Amino acid sequence: MKSNKKYSAGCGMDLNRQKEEFQYAYLYALAAHAGLNTGGFKVDDDSVDILVGGKGYSSKIRNPQIQIQLKCTAQNLVHGEVIKFRLSRKNYDDLRGDNILTPRYLAVLLVPENTDKWITYGDNSISLHNNCFWLSLREAPEINQETVTVDVPLEQRLKTDTLLEMIQAASNGEAI
């Protein structure tokens, strides 16, 4: 008998929790590939899910860090060349501004609706699907509404090289 659940492997995990775990795995894989360390906070009360750090930089800051707010969706939010992603005012305000020590970024992972398509296997490989995109709200204006839709450019794909660029900029006391 076939299950109507939107997840497979016989687990009972809530789909939103499953997306949350998958987005962590996706970012951890990128960071590991880049040779960067990852960490987090026990409580997400400042809109930060993952801390990514580098070591041994000879710039202004020798052990730079960045903070990332992760979001994962199977919704079709792509409009033209951007992802139209809705954020709460709290998340938006926590991620914006330049009065924070560690640069912060929003990362939006787009996944297929069918969880069976999140991962594919080859004889010598495993592939995580689909893609993750990033946005800095550092220069974003103040808002007065409870939610805001931000445009995450599809050209800003989060890759190993991107994480390294973010860490390099942080080592100079900057953000990209």
Image (cartoon, rainbow, N blue to C red):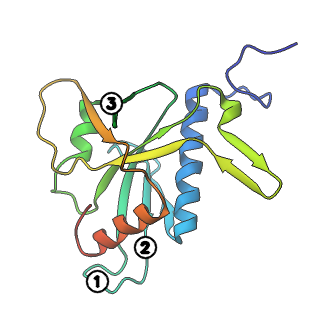
Q: Which residue is mark 2?
A: 54
Q: Report crowding for label 2: few under 14, some 14 to 19, many 20 or more residues within 10 A (C-alpha).
A: many
Q: CA distance from mark 1 to mark 3?
A: 35 Å
The residue drawn where x is 40% and y is 43% is 44
Q: Is residue 133 above or below residue 171?
A: above
Q: CA distance from mark 3 to mark 2?
A: 31 Å
Q: Is residue 20 left or right of residue 137?
A: right
Q: Which residue is mark 1?
A: 59
Q: Is residue 127 left or right of residue 48?
A: right
Q: Nearer the viewer, residue 61 or 7?
A: 7
Residue 174 place in picture, x, y as percent: 22, 67
Residue 39 place in picture, x, y as percent: 49, 59
The residue drawn where x is 75% and y is 56% is 125
Q: Amino acid at mark 3?
A: Lys
Q: Tags 2 and 1 in contact by the CB under 8 Å rule?
A: no
Q: Amino acid at mark 1?
A: Ser
- Tell which circle, 1 or 3, labels the residue nearer the N-terminal end: 1
Q: Report crowding for label 1: few under 14, some 14 to 19, many 20 or more residues within 10 A (C-alpha).
A: some
Using the rendered view, name the quadrant where residue 15 is placed.
Answer: top right
The residue drawn where x is 65% and y is 26% is 114
Residue located farthest toward the front when viewing the structure as drawn: 80
Task: Please state which of the two labelled residues, at mark 3 or mark 2, is closer to the viewer.
Answer: 3
Task: Please state which of the two labelled residues, at mark 1 or mark 3, is closer to the viewer.
Answer: 3
Residue 81 place in picture, x, y as percent: 33, 37
Q: Which residue is mark 3?
A: 84
The residue drawn where x is 59% and y is 26% is 113
Q: Secondary structure at mark 3?
A: strand
Q: Amino acid at mark 2?
A: Gly
Q: Which mark is residue 71?
A: none
Q: How many marks?
A: 3
Q: Tags 3 and 2 in contact by the CB under 8 Å rule?
A: no
Q: Is residue 25 left or right of residue 46?
A: right
